[in-house]
Each structure stands twice: as structure tokens, then as C-alpha cells.
Image: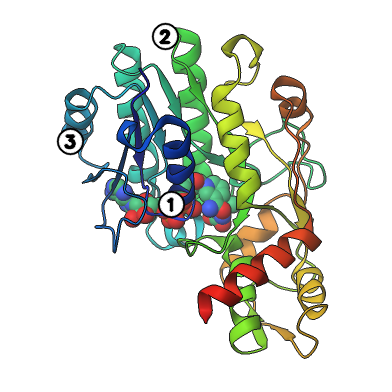
């Protein structure tokens, strides 16, 4: 019997992933948790408050609810972690170790923990960054993700823990706002295009970043978690490519729908983080191991984003 715990479930990914998991496994078999209280739990999935900095609280919730699988999404994203590096490091690493220890002690059978394109930095190929590439991140967030990948590989190899991970690109969605990342500009731009017909981008012209529409990211996560264990060859985190674009390219796409939309540029501290990240990612290994294939491109994602946000903002 699968019993799933989702941490950070009220965030950008969790709010959509929890809904999908409830559809697959039944709402009664999913427990959503976050440090915040939900405004409204329209999903009808059981909720409990959980601060993942509290090691004992994690252990209690797993044991008391006979949890078998965890999707550990609670984290501090890159832009916020740059401002609060110590808190970011502690949150982004310690709680993962607590879950890995529980799995080592056979209290959990499977863990999903997301890594990020932020693991790459100095010395990594910027275009089509390979799966096995140097990881010298230049952000505190990236440093914590590299450490997390290392924990996953060690717990897999030494203790046989089934922990699976993806290096998500910047995720673009309309249901829940992103929570303090460098790639958030590519969500903000759609809101501002509809509300003000203009957007001042904190990421500069010419900065290409790997991005992905949320529907593809959720599908990737489920596909990876449902893949046969013996097919998986990567035990750090899988590279995943979706869509690569610059601010002017996404602006041009929006202009096809909102002809008087204008973009301007005022890069801030997040530009240095973006400059250290790849432009695009080579995900050949994910294609080989679990048949990964994205469905959305910039064109179809823009149509979806504008359609859904238009009705949401009405
Ligand atoms: P988010 O910021 O939208 O959500 C994180 C959630 O964690 C929030 O609801 C927050 O309230 C909660 N949280 C914060 N501190 C907590 C604590 N101490 N205890 C419990 N909950 C706490 O983030 P997200 O975009 O949903 O990201 C989820 C994971 O995916 C993170 O590990 C992130 O690094 C990774 N990721 C996200 C993206 C992206 O573009 N969204 C890209 C790459 C990787
Ligand atoms: C961020 O910008 O911090 C995230 C990520 C790519 O990890 N969206």
C-alpha cells in the first residue's frame, strides 16, 4: 500500500504535484504538509503542518502515518537563499538527510527530491550541458543542491536507498506563484503582460536559460518515480531539458497575442546567478532510461499560460 508524504506542498510544484498524486493514488493516500497553513484546501487532500527543520517532527509524521514514499519539496530557492545563505543551506540539506536516514532504516521505501540546473556553474559547458559535467556552482542554492545530489548517490550506493531526482530547469506555471527563484521572471512576465502590457525584466537581454512548462515537469516526476528501479542509471539527479529562451524571445512570443506589450530590462543581483547557469541541457540519459520527452514548446506554453491566466485574473 503506497502512502505518500509531500513536503512544501503549498509551493509552486507541490500544489500541482499533490493534485496529480491524489488522482493516481487516491486523496486518502496522500498527506500534504507545509510550514504555512493552506488558504483553502480545494483539493480535499489531508493536510498537516510540518516544519522540515524539525527532525523529530519529520520522524513522527512518517511513522505515525505509515508513510512509504516522500516527495520532499520544501526548500529555499536561489534568489532567497542568496539573501539568507545559512538558513538556505540548513533547510536545503538537513531535511534531506533526515529522510535518507529514515529510508536507510527501512522506514521509507522511496524518496523523490528535486535538484536543479543550479548545480552547474564555473567550467561547465553552457550549451547542452552534459549529464556528467563539472558541478562548481556559484550560488549557495547550487552548493546545497550539489551536496544533496551527493547524499542521494551515497545513500543509494552504500545503503540501497531508492531515491530519485531531477535537475529541474526553471518551471513556468499559472496555478501557484513561484517562490523566490532566479527563473521567476518567466512567470512574472505573463502576469504583467496581461495586467499592464509592459514588463521590466530583472534578467537581462540575451540571457538564455533552460525552462519547462509545469505540466511537463509533473509528468517527468511521475514517470521517473514509476520507472522500474533497474532501468535507472543516474543516482545523483537526471538532467532534463524543456525549452530554452531569452527574455526577448519570450517577449516576442507574448507580443504575438498582445501586440502592444513592451519589455524593458533592469538586471539585478539575480543576473549573476543566471549568468552562471547553463543555456540548455543535454537530457539524453533521461530519454534512454525512462523515455523522457517534453511536450510543450515556447509557442504552446505561451498559449496555455495566457489562456489560464486570463480567466484567473478576471
Ligand atoms: P516553492 O518556494 O514554490 O515552495 C516551497 C514550499 O516549501 C513553500 O510552500 C514553503 O512554504 C515551504 N517551506 C519553506 N520552508 C519550509 C520548512 N521549513 N518546512 C516546511 N515547508 C517549508 O518551491 P518550488 O518551486 O515548489 O520548489 C520545490 C523544489 O523544487 C525545491 O527543492 C526547489 O529547489 C526545486 N526546484 C524548483 C524549480 C522551480 O523552477 N520551481 C526549479 C528547480 C528545482
Ligand atoms: C530558481 O530559479 O531558483 C529555480 C531553479 C532553476 O532551481 N527556479
Q: Is 138 left or right of 61, judged from the image as shown?
A: right
Figure disc tally: 3
- 179 w.r.t. 15: above or below: below
Local crowd size for mark 1, using a 10 Å CA cut-off: few (<14), some (14–19), many (≥20): some
Q: Is 11 left or right of 232, judged from the image as shown?
A: left
Specify the quadrant of the image occupied by residue 123.
top right
Specify the quadrant of the image occupied by residue 58.
top left
Label 3 and label 2: CA atoms lie apart by 23 Å
Of badges 1 and 2, nearer the viewer stands 1
Local crowd size for mark 3, using a 10 Å CA cut-off: few (<14), some (14–19), many (≥20): some
| Image location (x, y in percent) of residue 55 | 21, 34
Q: Say which residue appears at 60% left-offset and 77% top-offset.
A: 310
Specify the quadrant of the image occupied by residue 270.
bottom right
Q: Is 2 left or right of 276, judged from the image as shown?
A: left
Q: Is 224 left or right of 26, judged from the image as shown?
A: right
Label 1 and label 3: CA atoms lie apart by 22 Å
- 49 w.r.t. 313: above or below: above
Amino acid at each position: 500500500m503506497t502512502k505518500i508524504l509531500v513536503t512544501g506542498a503549498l509551493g509552486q510544484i507541490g500544489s500541482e504535484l499533490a493534485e496529480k498524486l491524489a488522482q493516481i493514488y487516491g486523496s486518502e493516500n496522500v498527506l500534504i504538509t507545509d510550514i504555512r497553513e493552506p488558504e483553502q484546501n480545494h483539493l480535499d487532500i489531508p493536510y498537516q503542518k510540518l516544519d522540515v527543520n524539525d527532525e523529530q517532527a519529520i520522524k513522527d509524521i512518517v511513522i505515525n502515518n505509515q508513510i512509504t514514499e516522500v516527495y520532499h519539496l520544501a526548500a529555499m530557492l536561489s534568489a532567497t537563499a542568496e539573501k539568507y545563505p545559512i538558513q538556505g543551506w540548513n533547510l536545503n540539506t538537513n531535511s534531506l538527510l533526515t529522510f535518507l536516514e529514515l529510508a536507510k532504516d527501512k522506514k521509507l521505501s522511496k524518496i523523490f527530491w528535486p535538484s536543479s540546473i543550479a548545480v552547474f556553474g564555473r567550467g561547465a559547458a553552457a550549451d547542452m550541458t552534459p549529464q556528467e559535467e563539472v558541478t562548481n556552482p556559484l550560488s549557495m542554492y547550487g552548493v546545497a543542491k550539489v551536496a544533496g545530489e551527493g547524499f542521494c548517490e551515497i545513500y543509494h550506493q552504500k545503503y540501497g536507498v531508492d531515491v530519485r531526482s531531477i535537475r529541474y530547469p526553471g518551471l513556468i506555471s499559472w496555478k501557484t506563484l513561484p517562490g523566490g527563484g532566479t527563473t521567476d521572471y518567466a512567470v512574472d512576465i505573463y502576469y504583467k503582460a496581461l495586467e499592464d502590457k509592459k514588463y521590466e525584466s530583472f534578467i537581462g537581454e540575451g540571457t538564455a536559460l533552460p525552462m519547462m512548462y509545469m505540466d511537463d515537469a509533473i509528468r517527468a516526476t511521475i514517470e521517473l518515480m514509476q520507472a522500474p528501479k533497474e532501468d535507472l542509471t543516474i543516482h545523483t539527479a537526471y538532467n532534463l531539458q524543456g525549452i530554452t529562451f531569452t527574455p526577448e524571445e519570450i517577449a516576442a512570443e507574448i507580443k504575438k497575442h498582445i501586440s502592444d506589450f513592451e519589455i524593458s530590462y533592469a538586471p539585478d543581483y539575480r543576473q549573476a546567478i543566471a549568468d552562471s547557469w547553463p543555456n540548455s541541457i543535454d537530457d539524453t540519459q533521461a530519454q534512454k532510461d525512462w523515455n523522457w520527452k517534453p511536450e510543450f514548446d515556447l509557442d504552446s506554453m505561451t498559449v496555455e499560460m495566457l489562456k489560464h491566466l486570463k480567466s484567473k485574473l478576471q
